């Protein structure tokens, strides 16, 4: 059975994630469709702008972490680097014609939050167990 704290954590993660995902999708498509930037530049620029927003939202709201901020930021940054690799693969597939820009952004918007939940809970913001 899921504890009340875990359920709150999951719901809050979804709320922060939905905000970031919606912002990502809107900003990336705006940069691409309205300004004319490539899918790749739109994806990376938007992602980089939203990294600090995501860190603060998940640290403060989702996990209510009181851990060492710089250690958490370092682990968070490693996860973000892996996320950027996923963005790179997706946007290259788009450039090669396998996906339209909006489809690329949709894949990124779904896969990254799912992988992040596991990584954030298990590693980035994991509470140390008392010995």
Image (spheres, rainbow, N blue to C red):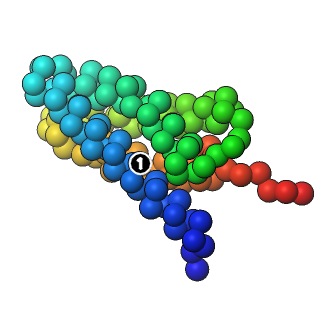
Please state, as top left, top right, bottom left or bottom right, where the C terminus lies in the image: bottom right
Q: Is residue 8 left or right of residue 72?
A: left
Q: Residue at horizontal 58%, vertical 51%?
A: 63
Is 36 situated above or below 92?
Answer: above
Judge the density around disc 1: few (<14), some (14-19), many (≥20) Cα neighbours within 10 Å: many
Q: Quadrant of the N terminus?
A: bottom right
Name the spot of residue 108 as percent of width and height, x first: 32, 42
**Side of 63 relative to 71 (left or right):** left
For label 1, the residue is 16
Residue located 45% across and 38% down the image: 54
Any part of residue 82 in sight? no
Image-quadrant location for residue 95: top left
Considering only vertical position in the picture, is 48 above or below 14? above
Q: Dot 1 lies on which element? A: helix
Q: Is residue 40 above or below residue 82?
A: above
In the depicted view, which residue is nearer to us: 101 or 61?
61
């Amino acid at each position: 059975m899921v504890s009340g704290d875990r359920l709150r954590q999951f719901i809050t993660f979804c709320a922060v994630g939905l905000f970031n995902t919606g912002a990502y999708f809107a900003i990336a498509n705006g940069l691409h469709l309205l300004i004319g930037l490539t899918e790749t530049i739109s994806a990376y620029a938007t992602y980089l702008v939203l990294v600090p927003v995501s860190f603060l939202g998940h640290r403060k709201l989702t996990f209510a972490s009181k851990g060492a901020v710089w250690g958490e930021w370092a682990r968070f940054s490693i996860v973000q680097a892996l996320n950027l690799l996923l963005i790179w693969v997706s946007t290259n597939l788009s450039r090669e014609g396998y996906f339209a820009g909006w489809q690329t952004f949709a894949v990124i918007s779904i896969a990254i939050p799912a992988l992040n939940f596991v990584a954030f809970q298990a590693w980035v913001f994991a509470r140390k167990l008392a010995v």
